[in-house]
Image: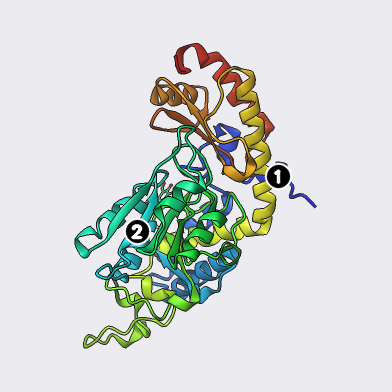
């Protein structure tokens, strides 16, 4: 049975005031998540320091994230950001041998590019896979870049600039054929699409809780395939990454025999409350139903944009896109501001306006957006 999306909208008060098409930047706040923040405040006021509960919350976020990705909790590090997870991961790689290449794509968010370039003094060679003239990055371009020298293929699932989804199974096959590992930056996909890290056969996956996972900034995750949780040794570490956190041993580094070895210091306690509430809300709906709804909403939005003569640059095929529709504009920032004046919340990157959909959006949101865009087309569509 399809979830009651109409009833779920009531749990997001901002939707009564705004057409909220900004989940690719920051999600709408759910009543449950607000209540979770308040529960933390109550704890602070009434108990002071509630460490037992706080550690339980952190473990709950780990378990719920594992459930979301079809991983085991031992394969999940709860991090402060994607950057924190990737820095710990990068610190565990050796780039001094023949396999020193890191293959990334033109679609990467800066996090998943700058951190690999930061490894260049350690011997890493970063190769960028370029897009084709049509704006997409075909599999052949990855085939040309991935070779026997490639240690890691580090790619985004959905591009934050244009909403395009890469052919992850195809790229994983190419990496496997050459013996390379694969890191998936799934931040623009997780929570909006159904993700199974085992079915995708990736070695690592990173994301955060503030977009489609309904949580907050300051908390993320790093999935590390079981077979690497004991063999990779991060030098970027901390006391919460130790096998025994309570040992307080200052004579040696004894990393946890799980993905927790990629964590660092004191967990982001308040963010764990929010992330837990967001993940529970999302899992109760289920990502297959959310994915279906997002495809329907983005498809309708793209078709309607075509009809008003202002087509998006996001790929049309479902298998090539996520939950964001990117629309080219001669002045994307000013267009975003004009839409906001009409209570339509979007974001912009480069020359594109981004309208990001989630399960709490509906057909009326598409209609309001299209009506405003039709009105603004003369001033803002590309010349
Ligand atoms: C694809 C992608 N990766 C990474 C990030 C940011 O990661 P961090 O948690 O390091 O800020 C974003 C944020 O917008 C993103 O869209």
Side (left or right) of 304 relative to 238: right
Q: Residue at x 56, y 57 (%)?
A: 169
Residue at image mark 1:
5
Tell me if mark 1 has few (under 14), some (14-19) or many (20+) residues whose alpha carbon lies within 10 angstroms of its own.
some
* Relative to 325, residue 118 above or below: below
Side (left or right) of 117 relative to 351: left
Q: Nearer the viewer, residue 156 or 37?
A: 156
Residue at image mark 2:
102
Q: Nearer the viewer, mark 1 or mark 2?
A: 2
Q: Quadrant of residue 311?
A: top right
| The residue at label 1 has a CB less than 8 Å from ligand 1 | no
Question: Is residue 295 in sight in this rendering?
Answer: yes
Q: Nearer the viewer, residue 117 or 338?
A: 117
Looking at the rendered structure, the secondary structure element under dot 1 is helix
Side (left or right) of 261 relative to 198: left
Question: Is residue 213 in sight in this rendering?
Answer: no
Q: Nearer the viewer, residue 39 or 254?
A: 254
In which quadrant is the C terminus drawn? top left
Q: Which mark is residue 108?
A: none
Q: Residue furthest right?
A: 1
Tell me if mark 2 has few (under 14), some (14-19) or many (20+) residues whose alpha carbon lies within 10 angstroms of its own.
many
Looking at the rendered structure, the secondary structure element under dot 2 is strand
């Amino acid at each position: 049975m399809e979830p009651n999306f109409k009833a779920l909208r009531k749990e997001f008060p901002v939707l009564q005031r705004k057409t909220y098409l900004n989940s690719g930047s920051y999600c709408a706040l759910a009543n449950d998540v607000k209540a979770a923040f308040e529960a933390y405040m109550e704890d602070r006021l009434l108990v002071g320091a509630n460490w037992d509960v706080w550690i339980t919350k952190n473990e709950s976020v780990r378990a719920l994230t594992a459930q979301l990705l079809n991983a085991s909790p031992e394969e999940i590090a709860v991090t402060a950001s994607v950057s924190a997870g990737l820095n710990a991961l990068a610190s565990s790689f050796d780039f001094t041998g023949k396999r020193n290449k890191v293959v990334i794509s033109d679609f990467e968010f800066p996090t998943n590019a700058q951190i690999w370039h930061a490894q260049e003094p350690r011997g890493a060679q970063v190769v960028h896979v370029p897009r084709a003239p049509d704006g997409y990055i075909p599999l052949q371009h990855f085939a040309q870049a991935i070779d026997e020298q490639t240690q890691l293929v580090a790619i985004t699932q959905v591009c934050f600039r244009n909403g395009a989804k890469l052919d992850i199974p195809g790229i994983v096959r190419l990496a496997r054929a050459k013996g390379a590992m694969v890191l998936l930056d799934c931040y623009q996909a997780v929570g909006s699409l159904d993700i199974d890290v085992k079915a995708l056969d990736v070695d690592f996956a990173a994301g955060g809780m503030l977009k489609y996972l309904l949580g907050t900034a300051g908390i993320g995750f790093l999935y590390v395939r079981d077979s690497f949780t004991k063999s990779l040794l991060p030098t970027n570490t901390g006391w919460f990454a130790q096998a025994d956190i309570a040992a307080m041993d200052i004579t040696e580094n004894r990393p946890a025999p799980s993905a927790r070895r990629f964590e660092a210091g004191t967990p982001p306690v308040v963010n764990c409350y929010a992330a837990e509430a967001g993940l529970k809300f999302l899992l109760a709906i289920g990502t297959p139903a959310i994915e279906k709804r997002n495809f329907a909403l983005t498809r309708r939005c793209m078709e309607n944009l075509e009809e008003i003569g202002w087509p998006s640059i996001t790929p049309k095929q479902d298998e090539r896109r996520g939950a964001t529709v990117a629309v080219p504009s001669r002045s994307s920032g000013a267009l975003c501001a004009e839409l906001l004046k009409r209570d339509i919340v979007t974001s912009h990157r480069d020359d594109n306006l981004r309208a990001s959909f989630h399960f709490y959006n509906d057909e009326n949101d598409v209609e309001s957006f299209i009506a405003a865009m039709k009105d603004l087309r003369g001033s803002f569509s590309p010349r």
